[in-house]
C-alpha cells in the first residue's frame, strides 16, 4: 500500500496540499470489519498540516487485496478552529453507533503538537464508510441510543465571538487579544503574567443569547514537560450588558482539574453582550488563550441561501476553484462535497471569503457539492447541488 499523490490530490503534502517538494507520509493504520468487508484505513499527507486526513481501502480479506475508494479521503477537516482528522480509529459505541477519532492540528510550539477529536461516523446503505466533520468543533448533541449519524446533531448554536472587539488586563509582545477570536487554534493571546486577576474580555457587538462557552488555553513560558496529576486551571467568567456592571456567569475558582480545553454549557441561555474571562490559577506559565469561543444565537432570521455557487475543475483534475456570492451577515460557509449528490459527507469550512481553491480531489472522479452560509443568527438552507 503506497501513496499516489499524482492521482490523489488529498495525499499531496503541505498546508492545503500546496507543497510539491516533499513526498507525503502515511501512517496510522486501522482496520474495521463491516458486512464481511475489511476497511483498511490510513493517514496522509502529514500530521502537521490542516489537511491531515484518513483514506480507506476495501477488501474481502484482512490481508487484501484492497481497492482504493473514489470517495477518499473519508475523514477530512481542512477548515475551522481545529483542523485535521487523520491518524484515526473507527469504532462502535455500546449503542452500535460508529465514531472516528482523529488527530487535530494544534501546533504553535512544535509542528507535531496535536489534539484528539471525535466525529460521528458509519456505513451507509451502500456500505460506504463516512465521517461527518461538519461543525465538528461546535457544540453537538451526544448519542444516548442508536441513531443515523448522517442526520446532523449540531445544536444550531453558532459563534458569537468571531473577530469581535476585545481587550485584556495586559498583553505580551505581539500576542494580541485578536488572536483569541480568529478561529485558529495555532495562535493565541498571552498576558504578561500568569497571576490571578489577569483577564481577557470581548464585546459581542449586541446583546445575544449565550448557550455555551469554550476556553482553549495556550502554552506560554510553560515548563512542565511530563505527565502531571497536580496541575489545574481555575477561572471565573463574568457577563455584562454595559461593560461596567459585571455578574458571575461561570465560577471555576475551585476547580482542581487540568482543563486545557474546557467546555461549559449553561443550564439555560443568558442574555449578554460583554464577557470576561478572569484567571484565578494557571496550570503552568503565563495566562494565555488560543480561543475564547462564545456559542449561541443572535436576534434575527437565519442567513439567506447562497447564490451563484460555482465549481470550476482545473486542467489538473485534482484542483477545483469554488466561488459564490457573499451572503449578508454570514461569517463563514460550509462547502459539502462527495461522489454522489446524496452523499455530501465531506466538508470544507471557509471563513469570510467567497472563493476557495481546493487541491484535494481524485483524478477521473465526478464530484457533487452544495454550500451553506453560517451567521450569528443561524445557518442558511443549503444551495442546490452542483456537479463538477
Image (cartoon, helix red, strand yellow):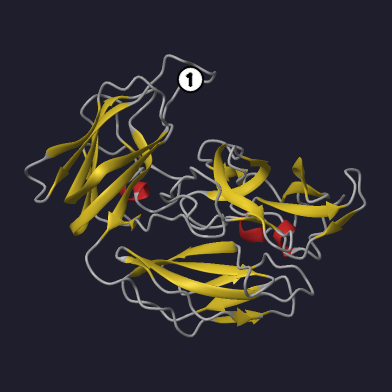
Q: Is residue 367 left or right of residue 113?
A: right
Q: Which residue is mark 1?
A: 224
Residue most extreme to the bottom: 308
| Residue 17 vs residue 232, the one in the foreground | 232
Q: Return the x and y of residue 294 as percentages of the image width and height.
A: 31, 49
Q: Return the x and y of residue 190 as percentages of the image width and height.
A: 34, 37
Image height check: is 108 above or below 307?
Answer: above
Image height check: is 330 above or below 278?
Answer: below
Image height check: is 9 above or below 215?
Answer: below
Is any part of residue 298 visible from this angle? Answer: yes
| Residue 77 vs residue 202, the one in the foreground | 77
Q: Return the x and y of residue 177 as percentages of the image width and height.
A: 30, 46
Q: Quadrant of residue 62?
A: top right
Q: Return the x and y of residue 195 as percentages of the image width and height.
A: 26, 24
Residue found 39% across the figure and 72% down from its top: 380
Residue most extreme to the left: 245
Residue found 74% across the figure and 57% down from its top: 11
Residue most extreme to the top: 230
Looking at the rendered structure, the secondary structure element under dot 1 is loop
| Residue 184 vs residue 35, the one in the foreground | 35
**Quarter of the image that includes the C terminus:** bottom right
Q: Quadrant of residue 304?
A: bottom left
Amino acid at each position: 500500500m503506497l501513496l499516489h499523490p499524482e492521482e490523489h490530490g488529498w495525499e499531496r503534502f503541505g498546508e492545503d496540499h500546496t507543497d510539491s517538494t516533499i513526498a507525503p507520509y502515511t501512517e496510522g493504520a486501522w482496520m474495521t470489519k463491516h458486512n464481511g468487508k475489511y476497511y483498511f484505513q490510513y493517514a496522509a499527507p502529514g500530521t502537521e498540516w490542516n489537511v491531515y486526513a484518513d483514506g480507506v481501502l476495501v477488501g474481502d480479506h484482512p490481508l487484501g487485496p484492497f481497492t482504493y475508494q473514489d470517495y477518499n479521503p473519508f475523514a477530512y477537516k481542512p477548515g475551522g478552529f481545529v483542523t485535521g482528522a487523520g491518524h484515526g480509529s473507527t469504532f462502535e459505541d455500546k449503542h452500535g453507533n460508529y465514531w472516528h477519532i482523529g488527530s487535530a492540528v494544534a501546533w504553535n510550539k512544535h509542528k507535531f503538537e496535536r489534539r484528539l477529536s471525535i466525529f460521528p461516523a458509519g456505513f451507509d446503505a451502500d456500505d460506504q464508510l463516512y465521517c461527518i466533520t461538519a461543525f465538528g468543533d461546535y457544540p453537538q448533541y451526544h448519542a444516548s441510543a442508536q441513531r443515523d449519524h448522517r442526520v446532523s446533531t449540531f445544536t444550531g448554536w453558532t459563534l458569537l465571538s468571531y473577530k469581535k472587539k476585545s481587550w485584556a488586563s495586559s498583553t505580551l509582545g505581539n500576542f494580541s487579544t485578536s488572536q483569541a477570536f480568529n478561529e485558529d487554534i495555532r495562535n493565541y493571546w498571552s498576558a504578561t503574567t500568569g497571576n490571578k486577576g489577569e483577564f481577557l474580555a470581548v464585546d459581542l457587538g449586541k446583546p445575544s443569547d449565550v448557550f455555551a462557552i469554550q476556553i482553549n488555553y495556550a502554552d506560554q513560558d510553560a515548563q512542565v514537560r511530563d505527565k502531571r496529576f497536580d496541575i489545574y486551571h481555575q477561572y471565573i467568567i463574568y457577563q455584562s450588558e454595559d461593560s461596567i456592571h459585571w455578574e458571575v456567569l461561570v465560577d471555576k475558582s475551585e476547580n482542581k482539574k487540568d482543563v486545557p480545553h474546557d467546555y461549559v454549557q449553561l443550564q439555560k441561555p443568558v442574555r449578554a453582550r460583554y464577557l470576561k474571562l478572569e484567571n484565578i490559577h494557571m496550570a503552568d506559565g503565563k495566562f494565555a488563550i488560543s480561543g475564547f469561543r462564545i456559542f449561541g444565537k443572535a436576534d434575527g432570521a437565519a442567513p439567506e441561501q447562497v447564490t451563484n455557487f460555482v465549481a470550476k475543475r482545473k486542467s489538473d483534475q485534482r484542483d477545483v476553484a469554488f466561488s459564490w456570492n457573499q451572503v449578508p451577515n454570514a461569517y463563514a460557509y460550509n462547502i459539502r462535497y462527495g461522489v454522489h449528490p446524496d452523499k455530501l459527507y465531506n466538508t470544507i469550512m471557509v471563513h469570510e471569503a467567497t472563493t476557495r481553491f481546493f487541491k484535494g480531489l481524485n483524478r477521473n472522479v465526478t464530484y457533487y457539492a452544495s454550500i451553506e452560509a453560517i451567521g450569528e443568527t443561524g445557518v442558511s438552507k443549503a444551495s442546490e447541488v452542483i456537479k463538477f
